[in-house]
């Protein structure tokens, strides 16, 4: 190997190594900063619902070798449930819409308009999430709480989790709807590419044996979408799990309580970290900050898990 | 605590550093002027927004940036030294003072807090509420607007059979401090189970909503029928404009009172003489037949030791102006946000504290 080649290899390797190193550093930082909380909270952190800074005007006490304010306890089951439930609702709503939009863009729109229509969908994907949140806060919540949820709760009163009370509009379903709108463009854009990569010969073969266009879509194209769909759905799930500002504005920020139905206020891990940061900064023992770092650690691991799954499931051509 | 663990603990608030780095970037525009930054209480923010333009017009050598975040942020960032003024409706706890002995709790005005509600048809009635009933509403013992305890306080009022939606602050807030202290002083169950603080362990009640800042509280109550919330008096113009109900609260003497030119000064008159030298005192649930039960000092948190003499001098100058009756404590400013000026004896203590800034 020539010296210049060796130099090139070292340089490129160094740059390439930076990305996993950043991830590793992030993990190490969160682990370090949440260590006292990990020791104080134990496994209860994941199995109970109790986020309590303790009496901030009392004097610190030592519990399990850590300094905390009297009465403090940190457990985030309600956040884990809120995060997973809102993301799953988002996915349930976004997948059919996303598939429909992708099929429409790839098959039904005249080629002349297709470029522009696709561009629009991709533009939607780049709208900052806080804008979705603001829209949800100003438009969606008053509309849903007055004109949709009360009727929904009435008609579905015998269905578990869908019956009354229909709540105030802030909550699980609203969060799910807004999150789904953020996921649809992601799903639609990726699936459209997958549909367009269907070999022309397959379509022609289908049409040649007398299938209608709809039958071609249903019997030839859709079955081929199964894998890419699983992949992009997982990516969308990753986005929904980590969404912060939009959820903060519309979720109702429930504290220490599991939702009783689909209209109940919730909190998610990401939004809770933002909303509680400045309260936590006042804890003279810093345990609340360590607790927030522990939420961050849990969220990082959850997102890594989801994205790793997506990488495994998405065909290589789509995962980039 | 050992030296080493103290060191480890000091490193934790780096999250705050990151969060506030943006603030620092503001205002280094002109070299000739000195820039001071204020952040914190959304209850004090409207007052600062009246003060700053008037003050900087007369004192062009200083530029002051203001931000409405929450008392929690105000306290944290003034301790970190990221801002010179941390606005807070709550004084620092003993534990916080022990950890940050250089912090001064400087009262600049007297404020009060409303309990607002949105019960269609009853927003003009001024429902009567007591601390104990509010505690029961917020911890779920009392779920409906027509519960017997509410009916008893409001004979003859057609209360609807509708779930109560309680609204509380999600951010660290001096308003939460005042409100939870009122509930603690009036209700034993609340005192034992929840207590008070700038953020408390809100009891798990189905349907309860968390909102951000006083503006968030106003908009949550406006958009949510059958809700109830606690809102700082500097937002009274807005709650009235939005047609929200304002409750009469039961004071220590058992009378139902609303915020006005008599009830707030009456409560202040009862509590100001008890103010200690460092001015950290609760004025909640003051004695007296006319006293309004939720009033407090509005604090500006300042570090006694500033990085240089010029900054310290400008901070002293601004704060002295802010509490003088010809300056920031004149009714021209305070009337607009429904605050009261500091009584003379409190002003003397405040000026002593301001003079400690160096």
Image (cartoon, rainbow, N blue to C red):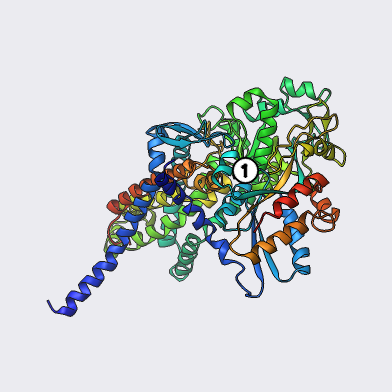
> Above or below — where is A59 with respect to A298?
above
Q: Is residue A196 left or right of residue B305?
A: left
Neighbours of disc 1 within 10 Å: few (<14), some (14-19), many (20+) = many
Task: Give the percent coordinates (x, y) of residue B128.
Answer: 79, 29
Q: Nearer the viewer, residue B309 or A277?
A: B309
Q: Nearer the viewer, residue B123 or A108?
A: B123
Q: Residue at x 83, y 27 (%)?
A: B255
**In what quadrant of the picture does the N terminus of chain A appear?**
bottom left
Q: Residue at x 84, y 54 (%)?
A: B325
Chain for mark 1?
Answer: B
Q: Which residue is mark 1?
A: B92
Q: Is residue B289 left or right of residue A143?
A: right
Q: Nearer the viewer, residue A223 or A43?
A: A43
Q: Is residue B148 left or right of residue B103?
A: right
- Quarter assignment of residue A196: bottom left
Task: Give the percent coordinates (x, y) of residue B345.
Answer: 80, 44
| Residue A148 seen in the current view | no
> Above or below — where is B59 with respect to A34?
below
> Above or below — where is A104 with respect to B247?
below
Residue furthest to the right: B262
Task: Give the percent coordinates (x, y) of residue B18.
Answer: 49, 57
- Quarter assignment of residue B221: top right
| Residue A47 seen in the current view | yes
Residue furthest to the left: A1
Task: Give the percent coordinates (x, y) of residue B78.
Answer: 60, 54
> Above or below — where is B280 with respect to A199?
above
- Quarter assignment of residue B135: top right
Q: Residue at x 67, y 33 (%)?
A: B181
């Amino acid at each position: 190997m020539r010296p210049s080649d060796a130099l090139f290899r070292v340089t490129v390797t160094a740059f390439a190594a930076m990305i996993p190193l950043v991830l590793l550093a992030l993990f190490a930082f969160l682990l370090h900063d949440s260590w006292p909380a990990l020791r104080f909270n134990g496994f209860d952190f994941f199995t109970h619902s109790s986020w309590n800074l303790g009496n901030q005007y009392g004097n610190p006490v030592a519990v399990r070798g850590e300094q905390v304010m009297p009465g403090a306890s940190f457990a985030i089951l309600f956040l884990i449930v809120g995060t997973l439930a809102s993301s799953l609702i988002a996915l349930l709503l976004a997948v059919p819409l996303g598939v429909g939009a992708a099929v429409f863009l790839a098959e039904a729109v005249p080629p002349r308009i297709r470029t522009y229509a696709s561009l629009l969908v991709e533009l939607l994907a780049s709208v900052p999430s806080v804008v979705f949140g603001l829209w949800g806060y100003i438009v969606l919540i008053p509309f849903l709480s007055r004109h949709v949820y009360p009727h929904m709760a009435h008609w579905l009163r015998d269905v578990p989790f869908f019956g009354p009370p229909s709540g105030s509009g802030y909550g699980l379903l609203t969060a799910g709807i807004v999150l789904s709108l953020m996921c649809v463009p992601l799903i639609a854009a990726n699936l459209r590419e997958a549909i367009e990569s269907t070999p022309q010969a397959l379509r022609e073969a289908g049409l040649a044996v007398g299938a209608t266009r709809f039958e071609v879509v249903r019997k030839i194209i859709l079955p081929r979408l199964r894998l890419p769909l699983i992949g992009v759905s997982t990516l969308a799930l990753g986005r929904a799990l980590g969404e912060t500002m939009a959820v903060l504005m519309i979720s109702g920020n429930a504290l220490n309580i599991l939702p009783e139905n689909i209209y109940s206020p919730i909190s998610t891990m990401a939004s809770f970290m933002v909303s509680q940061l400045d309260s936590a900064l006042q804890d003279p023992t810093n345990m609340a900050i360590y607790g927030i770092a522990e939420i961050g650690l849990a969220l990082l691991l959850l997102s890594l898990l989801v994205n790793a799954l997506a990488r495994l499931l998405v065909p290589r051509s789509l995962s980039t | 605590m050992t030296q080493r663990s103290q060191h480890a603990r000091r490193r934790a608030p780096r999250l705050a550093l990151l969060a506030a780095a943006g603030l620092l970037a503001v205002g280094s525009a002109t070299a000739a002027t000195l820039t001071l930054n204020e952040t914190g209480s959304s209850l004090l923010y409207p007052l600062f927004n009246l003060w700053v333009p008037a003050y900087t017009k007369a004192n062009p050598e200083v530029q002051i940036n203001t931000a409405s975040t929450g008392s929690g942020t105000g306290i944290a960032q003034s301790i970190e030294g990221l801002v010179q003024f941390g606005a807070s409706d709550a004084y620092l706890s003993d534990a916080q003072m022990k950890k940050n002995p250089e912090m001064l709790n400087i009262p600049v005005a007297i404020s009060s807090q409303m309990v607002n509600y949105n019960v269609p048809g009853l927003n003009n009635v001024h429902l009567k509420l007591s601390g104990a009933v509010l505690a029961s509403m917020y911890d779920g013992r009392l779920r409906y607007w027509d519960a017997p305890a509410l009916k008893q306080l409001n004979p003859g009022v057609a209360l609807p059979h509708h779930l109560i939606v309680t609204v509380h602050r999600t951010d660290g807030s001096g308003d939460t401090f005042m409100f939870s202290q009122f509930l603690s002083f009036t209700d034993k169950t609340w005192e034992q189970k929840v207590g008070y603080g700038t953020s408390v362990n809100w009891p798990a009640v189905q349907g309860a909503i968390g909102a951000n800042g006083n503006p968030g509280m106003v908009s949550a109550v406006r958009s949510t029928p059958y809700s109830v919330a606690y809102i700082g008096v500097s937002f009274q113009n807005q709650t009235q404009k939005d047609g929200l109900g304002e409750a009469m609260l039961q004071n220590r003497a058992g009378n139902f009172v609303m915020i006005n030119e008599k009830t707030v000064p009456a409560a202040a008159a009862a509590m100001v003489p008890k103010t200690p030298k460092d001015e950290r005192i609760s004025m909640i649930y003051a004695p007296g037949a006319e006293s309004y039960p939720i009033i407090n000092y509005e604090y500006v948190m300042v570090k006694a030791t500033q990085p240089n003499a010029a900054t310290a001098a400008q901070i002293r100058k601004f704060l002295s102006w802010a509490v003088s009756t010809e300056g920031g404590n004149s009714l021209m400013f305070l009337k607009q946000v429904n605050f009261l000026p500091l009584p003379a004896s409190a002003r003397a203590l405040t000026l002593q504290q301001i003079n400690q800034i160096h």
